[in-house]
Image (cartoon, rainbow, N blue to C red):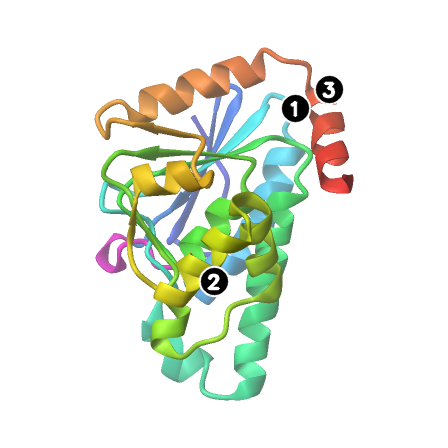
């Protein structure tokens, strides 16, 4: 494996053959995402996109407890204490998610454990989402009295449709992996024990396909 040097220890970036791994590494907080982690995402994608050997990019969380459990609220006092700071955070997250969505290389979200709030937004930004049967999904913004990025809502709406999107936001409840699959949010649900093997197998199939053809499909889908 080849590691990509980053400005934060809470993000791990490694290339392993044709796969670039983007790993959210904040286990004490169930991989909740911080400002520094948002900033690191475009840097990682720049590195992987410049590496010809990397044919597919996988996003995952450290351990089996969470993919991303939301925002790291320990930073609220320091980073979100003013409306200006909150707007800056929204801009950072929008840029990071846009970077994931517009990557010319296919992206896969490997989801184990909690995928909450910002985690749902990140997963939705990926091309393919594969989850363990123990994964849990929720967007709790309404319960917390918080806003949710319009672009993030639009992306989720495009994936699951208006009725499911409204249910997710209005109820703010937790959904099982099976429910998320029925909504169309998840492409595939597999056992927690077999999750990484399944993801690696999917990546092998993607890597065997022509990258220019894949990129053409990505652009066409984004345009339609």
> Of label 2 and label 1, which has the lower sequence position?
2
Spatial CA span between label 2 and label 1: 27 Å
Q: Residue 35 bears which disc, if any?
A: none
**Is 32 within the magenta?**
yes
Q: Picture coordinates of residue 22 (x, y %)?
A: 46, 40
> Is residue 58 part of the magenta span, yes or no?
no
Please report the bounds of the magenta region as a residue range: 27-33
Residue at 24%, 26% in the rendered image: 191
The structure residue drawn at horizontal position 33% and vertical position 19%, both measured from the top left corner, is 197
**According to the image, label 2 marks what residue?**
36
Q: Mark 3 — residue?
A: 213
Front residue of 16 and 204 = 204
Q: Quadrant of the C terminus?
A: top right
In space, the residues marked 3 and 1 are separated at their CA atoms by 15 Å
Image coordinates for residue 16, horizontal then vertical, percent: 46, 23
Name, please, the residue furthest toward the top.
Answer: 208
Residue 140 position (above or below residue 209): below
Which element is circle 1 on? loop
Report the side of 66 relative to 84 (left or right). Answer: left
Q: Relative to 36, does residue 97 appear above or below in the rendering?
A: above
The residue indicated by pointer 1 is 52
């Amino acid at each position: 494996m080849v590691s990509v040097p980053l400005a934060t220890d809470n993000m791990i970036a490694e290339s392993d053959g044709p796969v670039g791994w983007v790993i959210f590494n904040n286990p004490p907080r169930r991989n909740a995402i911080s400002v520094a982690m948002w900033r690191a995402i475009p840097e990682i994608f720049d590195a992987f996109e410049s590496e010809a050997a990397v044919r597919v990019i996988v996003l995952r969380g450290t351990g089996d407890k969470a993919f991303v459990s939301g925002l790291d609220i320990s930073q609220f006092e320091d980073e979100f204490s003013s409306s200006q700071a909150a707007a800056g955070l929204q801009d950072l997250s929008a840029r990071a998610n846009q970077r994931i969505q517009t990557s010319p290389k296919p992206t896969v979200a490997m989801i184990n454990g909690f995928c909450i709030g910002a985690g749902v937004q990140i997963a939705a930004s990926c091309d393919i989402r594969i989850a363990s049967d123990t994964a849990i999904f929720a967007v709790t913004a309404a319960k917390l009295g918080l806003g949710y990025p319009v672009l993030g809502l639009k992306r989720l709406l495009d994936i699951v449709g208006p009725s499911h999107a409204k249910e997710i936001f209005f109820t703010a409840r937790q959904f099982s992996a099976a429910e998320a699959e029925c909504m169309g949010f998840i492409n595939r649900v597999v056992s927690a024990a077999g999750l990484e093997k399944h993801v690696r197998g999917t990546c092998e199939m993607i890597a065997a396909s022509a990258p220019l053809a894949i990129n053409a499909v990505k652009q066409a889908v984004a345009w339609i």
